[in-house]
Each structure stands twice: as C-alpha cells, then as structure tokens.
Image (cartoon, grey):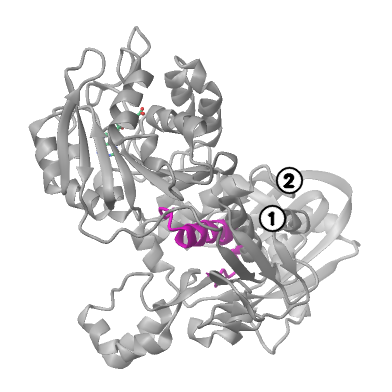
C-alpha cells in the first residue's frame, strides 16, 4: 500500500496512547515528558553537548506523538547556544493524525504552544520526506515517513545524538533489527551519543557492534535501568564550531533563485542575488499566474516519491506567503491511457483524502493545489538579500568569484540562460505561451487542468500553456500557440471560453529549460573533465558515484525545471541550503541520485564506452 498505515491507536483510561498492533505505549504512564527528559535528553548529554556547535543533529527512531521532539525543542529554547541550529530528524512508519498528536500532547501545558506549532505543520498522510523549519527558533524537523527498513538506508544525515525509541524490543523487533546498526554507524558523527529506555541484551550488543560503548544507568520512575552509549567514530572530526555565516551568490532572480534566497536567508546565510534584468521573474516565472499541482505516477517508484516530496515541499513553503491562493484543481484525463492511469492511481493512492479525491467520470481533484501570483510572491521571497539588478554575472568557477567578489558558494539558477553558459547540463529550450485577460467579475481561486490549464483568480483569467520546440534565441509569440490554447480551453470548459469573448487578450511566451528525463538538476555543478578522465574507473564501479563527487567545489545548480518551476523550486532550495550548511538532507538518497546534475554526462560517457 502506498499510503503509510495508521497505528491501531487506543487510549488508556489514564489518557496514555497505545498502539494495539504492538501492544505498547507511546510514552510512560508516569509522566512521559519527565521520562523523555531523563532518558533521551539527559541520556545524550543535553544541553551541554550542543554548546558551541554551529549545528547539532538529533536522530530519532520512532517519532510517535512528537513528545521527544517537543521536549528537545523546549530545552533548545531555554538553553540553545547563541548561534547554533538544531536539526531533529525522525523516522516514523505509522504516523498519527494531527488531532491524535494534539490529544497525546495535552497533558503538558508547558509544551502547548510548541504542540500547536507542530500540529499546524504536521505533514499530510503520505510516504515522504518532509522538512519543517522554525527559523526564529533556529530549529528544523525532518520526518522520514515509511517503514524503518525503507527509510533509514535512504537518509542522508550525520547524527550527534540518537534517541532509540521504537517500542519495546520484545514487542517490536523491526525497530531494533540487526540490519539497522551498521546504518546507524554510517550516520553517526564522531563522539555521537545514543540513549534508550531499554537495556535488552540484543540492544547492548547491537550498540557495541555499531561502535558505541553502552552503559547502564538508573532508570526513570519505577524503571530500574536505561542505557546511555558513546560512539568512538573512526573518521576525522570536522569543525562544526560557530563561524561567520556563509556568503552565497545566486545567479538569477526567477522562482528558483527567489526560493533559494528565502531558504538560505532563513538558515542564516549572507545572500547576494545577481540578475541580468531590472526586476525579478522576467523569464518564465513572470506569468501573471502560475499553477502548482502534483504530477502523480501510478506506480510507487523513486520518481513518483520524489515528485510527491517536491509537491508537499512547495505546498508547505508557499502557505501563508504573499500572492498565494489554495484551490482545488479539477484534473480531467486527456485520453484513455490517462483515464486508465488515474484509475490505477486511485486504486492505491499515494496521498490521503485531504489532498486527493476521485471525480465522477474519471478525473482527479487536487484539493490543496495552489495558484500563485508571482508579481506579489517573488519580491517577498527576495527580501533581506543583496540584490544586484541589471547585472550580468561573470563567474570564475575555480576562484568562486562573481564579478570579482568571492563567495563560499555560488548557485546557478538562471533557467534557460544557464544552458548557454553550461552546455554540459544538456538543457533543451521549450517554448511556452499563455494568454490572459482581466474580467469584469471577481472569481474565487479556480483551476482546471488536462495537459493545458485554465486559471481564475480575482479578475484574472489565464489559459495555457503550449510546450513547443524553441526556435531562435528569443521567445516568440505565435498565432498557432493561441489557437492551441483556445482549443484546449474549449475542451476544459466551454463556459470559460464564452467568458473570454471580446476580452482584451494579452499573451506571453517564455522558454523553459528542460532535461531529457524531465527531472530537475539539483546539486553540484559537474566537473565534466574529471568525469571524462576517470571514465574507466567509473565503468568499473558501474557508473554509480556519490551525488557530491566530481563536482566543482562550492558551485551548485538549481534548474531544468521545465514547466514545473514553481513546484520544484522550494524543494531544490531546501536541498541546496542543506548541502551548503551540511545539514541532514530533506530527500532520499535515491532521489538525490535521480536529480544529480551530472547524470547526462554519465549517460553519454556510458554510451560512448560501451
Ligand atoms: N518518540 C515517540 C514520542 O515522542 O512520542 C514515541 C515513539 S513510540 C514508543 C515508537 C514509534 O515507533 C511509534 O510511533 C511507531 O509507530 C514507530 N514504529 C514502530 N515500528 C516501526 C517501523 N517498523 N518503522 C517505522 N516506525 C516504526
């Protein structure tokens, strides 16, 4: 099943939640918060362990009600280092609904405001990786939703502390399986601590195999003992002490650059944006309205999952910002194949009912899609950055300078223009044309889609978009594209066509940068010469390399977004911000490999070698 299962939740008379599937409680009957503090926080040497650290990462097996997370957040608020960032990464296979989380956390009034924050941002029911940040508190939560044997091997993180909280080992072996220990070793920072409520022999042996030295300590309340453990680590410690914020240059002030700017500023970077035009979003991001709706694949593949991660990331990122309206998009199938695909999708949907419903006649209703007004959104996202308008960027990759100014990181996010500067990225231009007019009547946000789309927001009515080969250096409007858009509108909704009769129609064309596999480019700029020089070695390792390998140090790419720029941009921004700050990554390993910018070069080398 694609949706994560619900726990078999039961509430004891004293209010403690139990998962009947396992027959165990989520937290102690005798004050779960006090136990959480004693077993996990004190057990991992907190708050002392995070003092002076630029960032500190806690990983938890078993998110449950979020009580341990809130206990850590509460302590962080009271005793955080003056400039650090806390990453809390948690793994959960049977997520609770937000109202159950709320009920479970009720007993602790001191956590009430944090619990309310958590509940409003709880991810929807889906197997996904969700990053939620509270930048005012310098803390983020990354949730990996799915069974532990599927999620932990795919997680990119380096933990300073482990909260091992997966129900009693006697009742729930999966969370203590022998296969997990090497994964924990691989993801532990030197000197990492681990804590758990159980002293079971198998757990102590597992910790020892993982390179930890476990020690029994007096238990909390009526429990006799608990475990604390320290990881020796056999690799060199890198400095993670607080230093000056990284200086980051972003090339391009379209939606990719603007989301990056926002995400990096929230994380504490000093950001400069270079834009050749005089204002943001002069390229394809500059249409009067944009639609964010999901692309849902019928099978549960790596690609299907990353599309959902990106969509949910976009929803959460845009919510509450200027120029954003949530709407239900009516998505009708284009042909019989699509009808069949929708049916297969709905037979085992990847998103729950808060997000997705079936429409009579075979369509999909995307219940939390968004209509965006870029002219309102982008200036808001670019606040608190150094903006260099009308500036073409001269980038020296080896020196990491832009127009002579040195940066810790440079991110190429200039859409189609990037293709000319970096031919190795193999971007193809696709021309997209839209038409719109201002109606006399104000409409509630409304969207219809079927290949093309039609949007209504306030007085604006917009239809589009074509997807054609780009001919010539600049985008050109064409009558043929207008005819296609009109025909599509007729099929989508003849009434809307009627509404547009006699209107003062405006049109706009832009070039979208697309990739051969229609997935974005997110990661380090590939070093083509180094890849080519090592082709034999690469062949020997079956062309699988770490996503960060063979890249130009400190130079990154966010692009190839095709016609889904507003969907990909927040996810790409989150990933690149995490890479630059060495935070845990908000994406699965296999997803990072699918969007790695060197993939076209590798494919070509592979073809020419075989
Ligand atoms: N730390 C939690 C808190 O603060 O409320 C309590 C965690 S509870 C004791 C154990 C959690 O592990 C449950 O939420 C359960 O759904 C999760 N879990 C159990 N088996 C799992 C599995 N195979 N994969 C992922 N999560 C699992």
Determine the secondary structure under disc 1.
Answer: helix
Q: Please tell me in which quadrant of the rendered image residue 253 appears.
A: bottom right
Q: Residue at x 74, y 48 (%)?
A: 322
Residue 362 appears anywhere in the view: no
> Which quadrant is home to the N terminus?
top left
- Is residue 572 part of the magenta span, yes or no? yes
Is residue 310 left or right of 178 when viewed as pictured? right
The residue under label 2 is 445
Q: Is residue 155 magenta?
A: no
Taking the image as drawn, is residue 6 in sight?
A: yes
Q: Position of residue 220 (x, y in %)?
A: 25, 18
Is label 2's Cβ within 8 Å of ligand 1? Answer: no
Start-end of magenta stretch = 558-586
Q: Which residue is mark 1?
A: 381
- Is there CB contact under 8 Å for labels 2 and 1? no
Image x and y of residue 510, in percent = 71, 74
Q: Is residue 281 above or below residue 241?
A: below
């Amino acid at each position: 099943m694609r949706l994560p299962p619900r726990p078999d939740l039961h509430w004891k008379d004293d209010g403690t939640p139990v998962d009947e599937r396992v027959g165990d409680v989520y937290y102690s009957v005798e004050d779960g918060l006090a136990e959480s503090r004693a077993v996990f926080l004190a057990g991992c040497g907190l708050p002392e362990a995070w003092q002076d650290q630029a960032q500190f990462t806690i990983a938890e097996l078993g998110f449950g009600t979020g009580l341990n997370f809130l206990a850590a957040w509460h302590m962080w608020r009271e005793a955080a280092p003056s400039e650090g960032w806390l990453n809390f990464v948690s793994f959960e296979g049977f997520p609770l609904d937000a109202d159950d989380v709320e009920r479970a956390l009720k007993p602790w009034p001191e956590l009430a405001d944090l619990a309310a924050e958590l509940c409003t941002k709880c991810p929807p029911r889906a197997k996904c990786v969700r990053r939620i940040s509270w930048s005012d508190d310098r803390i983020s939560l990354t949730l990996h939703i799915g069974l532990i044997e599927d999620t932990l091997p795919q997680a990119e993180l380096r933990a300073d502390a482990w909260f091992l909280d997966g129900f009693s080992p006697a009742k729930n072996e999966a969370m203590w399986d022998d296969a997990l220990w090497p994964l924990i070793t691989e993801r532990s920072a030197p000197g990492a601590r681990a804590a758990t409520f159980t002293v079971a022999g198998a757990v102590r042996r597992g910790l020892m195999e993982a390179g930890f030295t476990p020690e029994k300590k007096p238990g909390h309340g009526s429990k006799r003992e608990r475990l604390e453990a320290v990881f020796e680590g056999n690799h060199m410690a890198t400095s993670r002490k607080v230093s000056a914020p990284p200086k980051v240059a972003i090339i391009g002030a379209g939606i990719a650059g603007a989301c990056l700017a926002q995400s990096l500023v929230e994380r504490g970077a000093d950001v400069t944006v270079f834009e050749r035009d005089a204002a943001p979003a002069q390229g394809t991001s500059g249409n009067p309205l944009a639609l964010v709706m999901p692309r849902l694949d019928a099978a549960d593949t790596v690609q299907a999952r990353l599309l959902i991660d990106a969509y949910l990331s976009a929803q959460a990122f845009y919510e509450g910002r200027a120029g954003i309206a949530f709407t239900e998009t009516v998505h009708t199938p284009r042909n019989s194949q699509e009808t069949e695909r929708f049916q297969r999708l709905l037979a085992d949907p990847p998103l729950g009912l808060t997000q997705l419903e079936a429409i009579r006649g075979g369509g999909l209703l995307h219940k939390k899609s968004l209509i965006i007004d870029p002219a309102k959104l982008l200036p808001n996202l670019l606040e608190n950055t150094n903006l260099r308008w009308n500036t073409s960027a001269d980038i020296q990759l080896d020196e990491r300078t832009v127009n002579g100014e040195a940066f810790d990181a440079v991110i190429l996010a200039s859409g189609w223009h990037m293709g000319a500067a970096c031919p190795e990225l193999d971007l193809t231009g696709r021309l997209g044309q839209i038409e719109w007019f201002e109606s006399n009547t104000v409409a509630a946000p409304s969207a219809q889609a079927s290949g093309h789309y039609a949007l209504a927001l306030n007085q604006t009515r917009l239809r589009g978009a074509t997807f054609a080969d780009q001919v010539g250096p600049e985008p050109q409007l064409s009558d043929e594209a207008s005819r296609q858009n009109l025909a599509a509108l007729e099929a989508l909704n003849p009434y809307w066509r009627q509404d547009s009769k006699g209107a003062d129609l405006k049109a706009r064309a832009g070039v979208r940068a697309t990739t051969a596999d229609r997935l974005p480019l997110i990661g380090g700029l590939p070093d083509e010469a180094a890849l080519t020089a090592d082709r034999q070695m690469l062949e020997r390792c079956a062309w699988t390399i770490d996503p960060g390998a063979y890249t130009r140090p400190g130079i990154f790419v966010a692009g190839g977004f095709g016609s889904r720029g507003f969907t990909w941009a927040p996810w790409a921004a989150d990933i690149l911000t995490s890479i630059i700050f060495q935070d845990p990554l908000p994406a699965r390993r296999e997803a990072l490999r699918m969007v790695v910018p060197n993939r076209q070069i590798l494919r070509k080398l592979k073809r020419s070698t075989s």
